[in-house]
Amino acid sequence: MKQGGLGGRTAGLRPAQRRRLERLCHRRHPPAALAELLCVQRLASESRELELPLTLVIDGRGLCRLLWVGPLQAWGQRRGGLPGARRGENRELRLVTCCGRGRHLEPERLEGVAALDLEPLLWLRYGDQAGAGGQWPALLLQASGDSGEPWPVREAGDLALLCGRDPAGLAAGIPPALGPETGTPGDPSAGATPSPGRERVLLLALSPADRGLAQRRIGELEGLVRSAGADPVGVVEQRRGQPAPQTIWGEGKLAEAALEARQRGVTLVVTDRDLTPVQGRNLERLLDLPVSDRSELILDIFAQRAASAAGRLQVELAQLRYRLPRLLGRGRSLSRQGGGIGTRGPGETQLEKDRRAIARRIERLQRQVRDLGAHRERLRQGRGSLKRLALVGYTNAGKSSLLNALGRGDPRQAVLTEDKLFATLDPTTRRIELADPAGGPCTPVLLTDTVGFIRDLPPPLVEAFRSTLEETLAANGLLLVVDLSDPAWPDQLRTVHAILDALGSAVPRRLVANQIDRCPAGELERARHLDPQALFVSATARLGLQSLRGALRHWPAHN
């Protein structure tokens, strides 16, 4: 009965060669031995004739499941195991590879990645002929979770000796198979051990020359991943003077990332750079994993955080604008209209229909967003001549905590505060009564908490949330909140100024330095040097709030 099949470079095989290879596929290997020596030697003979490496994939019963012709890195069933195999069945597999003439017995990096896709426990590798004295050198490798060496050598010796090894006895001392089920610890730089059931993410970063800046950017990307509900389990960095136009990262670094992903059981790769549609598809093809860029990650966080109908409307508009140029799918396999003989089909493809449907949906959402902007403009006009101030700043700088501390109102009216990026999206306005120290009447002020900013804010998101950001543009003044306990706060402040300038904001701005109880002493002087009129507070410890209320009370009512 036929048990296995041929794969790989089989198109150019002669009928006699194909028949001999198929006979090797049908041979059964002893259950108590790694491989049958005669079959392995015949495999070497075929490898010499074809001048190609050959690989047998043998299951726990000794049956050959596949004979792969050519380099193993050309394996096309990436991340899917053998065709028809049940989940977990591959854990009893073993590989037997005749490396061919003039090839190293140690696997190359890409070959090791392809072998990890098959999830075998053992891998026997040998040359296509015996050496001097009749000795046939061979290596026995075992799968390892070590990020430094995925296929360490378990034993080196004569081919006949290694073929007689008992796979069950060898497997008894091998740790469980690689993957998410093993609980492989994440990279120390990525934080704590990942939680079971959560998506495991590998970060792919193009680092600048400044090491401190590179670490801060990777830390921010890790925070975004955790805010999205996933666990960063590893980081692959590269510093390049000129990014590759097709993939940004070099092929060697991407091979390293693919290997790291398989060792850590990664289910998603997130890049710290925005990708063009072509770059995204190239990376997914080379890594054989879903790839998301930084903009898509931020859009996903916004989609999770949007609580109001207005917020969900704006997030959907931003997502559709982002996805429209990246739409790819069934339309490639359907007929197309063309202008030449043989290219005319019955009509437009499904892909083109999907694009038209998305374009119509975007048009409807744009009308609703314009209506939302007009509604908020009427609300602003109805507030009369009250002073309107807005809290702006980098995400997670403490704006919502500061609004709650100044409000002193009903706890049920408090704004949500979490130690997460983009915890709040919808603008929240509170009326704050500022008492007169001289005993005069209280001064009412409308204080608005706005969505946080971030470096390289995705353009579709800025455009979709323009009606929300108009709350900032229409204010009489802006309070720029920074977290002094964050070493990157000066860079974050420059980012906020740049975004406000790009939006055309010309209202007065004043720095509010938060977390003065948790920052180094030198940061206070640094903030005072940037803005001599800076206000120093701690929203959580309720420090400096009286001075802040006094500054709000004396803020001019008109720009």
Image (cartoon, rainbow, N blue to C red):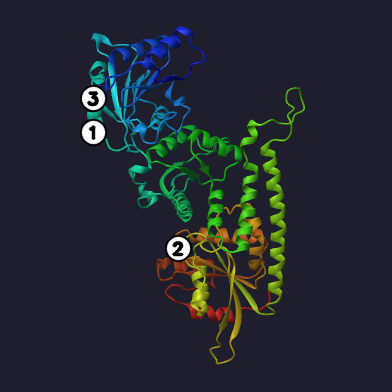
The residue to which callout 2 is attached is 419
Residue ID at (55%, 91%): 438
SS under mark 2: loop
Disc with the residue nearer the chain's start (3 vs 1): 3
Please tell me which of labels 1 and 2 falls first in the chain: 1
Q: Nearer the viewer, residue 550 or 431?
A: 431
Q: Residues within 10 Å of mark 2 (few under 14, many from 20)?
A: few
- Residue type at the position of mark 1: Ala
Q: 88 left or right of 493?
A: left
Q: Is residue 528 visible?
A: no
Q: Which amino acid type corresponds to the residue marked 2 in the rendered image?
A: Asp
**Residue on which the image places disc 1:** 172
Q: Kindly report which numbered mark, 1 or 2, lies closer to the viewer in this rendering.
A: 1
The answer to whether marks 1 and 2 mark residues whose Cβ atoms lie closer than 8 Å is no
Identify the residue at the far front of this view: 1
Tell me what residue is drawn at x 42 percent, y 24 percent. Answer: 72
Query: In 3D space, how far apart are the residues under numbered discs 3 and 1 (Cα atoms)?
Result: 10 Å
Residue 148, compared with residue 540, is above or below; it is above
> What residue is shown at x 50% (from left), y 39% (from top)?
240
Image position, residue 46 (x, y; %): 39, 11
Most foreground residue, 257 or 170: 170
Counting from the top left corner in percent of width and height, residue 537 is at 47, 73
Q: Quadrant of the C terminus?
A: bottom right
Tell me which residue sits at (31%, 22%) in the image: 62
Secondary structure of the residue carrying tag 3 is: loop
In this view of the protein, which residue sits in the foreground, 289 or 254?
289
Q: Which residue is mark 3?
A: 166
**Could you tell me how far apart the alpha carbons at marks 2 and 3 are, in whole angstroms?**
54 Å
